[in-house]
Amino acid sequence: MNEATQLTLSIQNDKNNYATFQNGLNIDNGQKVMYLGNVSGGPITGSKGIVKKLYANKAVVDMGLVGTWNVPYYFLSETA
């Protein structure tokens, strides 16, 4: 047991596997989305929610127990 081994963790929700929205043209109220951002103090990466309202550069997303957040479109992806 003198050898060091590196454990790996496989992540199911790898954000490189999801295409994010670039603007509000392809997103609608009531649509299910996934948050892919990593902002300190923000929602948890991979949180899923429903779009409640659309603005020019962001959407209001209800993420259940995580809360309701104003999220820029480039942090949102369609759920699989």
Image (spheres, grey):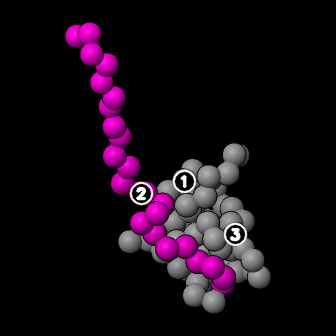
Quick one: label 3, few (<14), some, or many (20+) residues within 10 Å?
A: some
Q: Earlier in the sequence, mark 2 or mark 1?
A: 2
User: Is residue 30 rendered to the left or right of residue 1?
Assistant: right
Main secondary-structure element of the magenta-colored stretch: loop
Q: Nearer the viewer, residue 49 or 27?
A: 27
Stretch in magenta: 1-24
Q: Which of marks 3 and 2 is nearer the N terminus?
A: 2
Residues at marks 2 and 1, CA–CA distance in whole angstroms = 9 Å
Q: In which quarter of the image is the N terminus?
A: top left
Given the image, on which type of amino acid does mark 3 rest? Answer: Pro
Given the image, on which type of amino acid does mark 1 rest? Answer: Thr
Q: Which residue: 54% across, 53% down?
A: 45
Q: Mark 1 and mark 3 in contact (Cβ < 8 Å)?
A: no
Quick one: label 2, few (<14), some, or many (20+) residues within 10 Å?
A: few
Q: Mark 1 and mark 2 in contact (Cβ < 8 Å)?
A: yes
Q: Where is residue 14 in the image (x, y as percent from the top left)?
A: 43, 57
What numbered label is drawn on residue 72?
3
Which SS class for mark 2?
A: loop
Q: Position of residue 49 (x, y in %)?
A: 54, 66
Q: Which residue: 55% across, 73% down?
A: 20
User: Is residue 13 rendered to the left or right of residue 32?
Assistant: left
Q: Which of 35 and 52 is in front in this view?
A: 35
Residues at marks 3 and 2, CA–CA distance in whole angstroms = 19 Å
